[in-house]
Image (spheres, grey):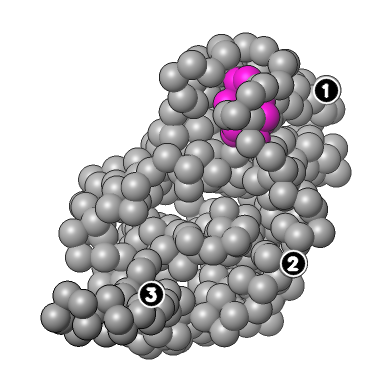
Amino acid sequence: MFFATYFYQGLVAGFSLTALANHLAAQGVSSAEVGLHFAIAGLPWTVQPILWGPLVDRASRFAMGRRRAWSVLAILGCHLALAGLLLVPGERSLGALGLVFLAHSTFAALLDTACDRMVMDHVPQGELGRMSACTRAGFVAGTSLGAGLFGWLLAAYGFRFGALCLLAAAIFASLPILLVREAPGDAFLSSARRVGADAGRNVPFGRFLRRLGLGLRRPHALRLVALCFSIDGALALFELPFSVALVQAQGWDAAALSRLQAGLAFAGGTVGAVAIGSWCDRAGPLPALRALFLASAAAFLATAALIAAGLAGSAGPLILGFTNVLPGLLIVALVPALMQASRGRAGAATQFEVFMAVMNLGSVAGGAASGALMPVLPLSLVAILAGLVLLGAAALVRRPELILPRPRQPRAIPVHRDASARSGSDLGRREIG
């Protein structure tokens, strides 16, 4: 079910962020206009914790399962939003496209929130790496299929037929989300509330927000917020302008570019994600995360050298490999680290959602800024900037005490000395956890 959730999200992302973006670039739409379209569609992801976090985190009385009821509601809303693509006059109606994907992102953010809550509820600490690999593999498989298939459909059959095929594929991909129960004994489809001891209770909203605020004000949490924003912002600042430059300045075919990006993402996000996830479960997420930051920084600095040497067109496949595969694996190691930093605290699940929303905000900000910076800032300098940000991230991860909370120490409670005197031994102090 986790795989299917992220496969569905990737399918839509492959259509909108890759296939449609390259299709628009081939028709002469500027990167600034495309970037604005993506920024509008990404807004719900930036406010995801405020929009859905407290609602899903505090609700616990559904007969369909604590989180599954929200998943079902979200996926139905997603399909209704995608059906709105059939009412858009054409692909150049960027305003209407932005509104449709804005509505879809609103429901997709609810789906993502419910899925993250189920992970926090049911996946053990020692399996978070494999879980992260599974969700990443689902997302890149969906993105690869969406980018490759819809890139061809848009070029060959036009926007309306591509949108109809997207809706059909999305409904089929979402079937596991609708069919798999969250826990044994949950109702398959019901609007009823759970009664009895298993119903749980809602934490008052004010108390919930206070607990969440205390968790996010801790220094390690603030550093993680800055890390999440800067990483995705730096990557998005480079990715869209480089794709547009390949099509408009280097003469690449948009459909061919979509297929190449899909293939690279699929290779890195399946075999690579499984390897990184297993590594995280064996050694912990931070060693893998540090190595990936260093490798990605080196890849972007090498990319800057190739672009500065005038080899952007001929070395395009190599540059795409440098700047897509390694950074794409960062999320596999980053998710277990963020969950480790969030678990065991009040409002832990929503705190994790805040970290993910900050990453989305960084991506939206980077994509929006890329259109304005492209005419004035050479791509080689953008690649250098991204490499320096990744180097700084590696230096921060090298010191776990800066980004992870300190383990809670057990409290020592004294016991009566007369008990030890009667037994002839000195019990001293008794540790309780």
Q: Point out the image quarter for the N terminus.
A: top left
Helix, strand or loop at mark 3: loop
Classify mark 2: helix, strand or loop: helix
Q: Earlier in the sequence, mark 1 or mark 3?
A: 1
- For disc 1, the marked residue is 87
Question: Which amino acid does the dot numbered 2 rest on?
Answer: Arg
Task: Report the magenta residues as a range.
Answer: 60-70
**Residue 163 drawn at (x, y percent):** 66, 24
The image position of residue 227, as x and y in percent, is 52, 76
Q: Position of residue 169 (x, y in %)?
A: 54, 20
Q: Which dot, 2 or 3, sits closer to the camera? A: 3
423 vs 159, left or right, is left
Task: Residue 77: tell me if it is visible.
Answer: yes
Q: Return the mark for residue 16.
A: none
Tell me the distance, in whole angstroms, between the alpha carbons under discs 1 and 3. Answer: 61 Å
Q: Measured from the top left, where is residue 388 in percent x and y?
A: 45, 86
Q: Is residue 61 magenta?
A: yes
Q: Nearer the viewer, residue 178 or 382?
A: 178
At horizontal 75% and vertical 22% (from top left) the residue drawn is 80
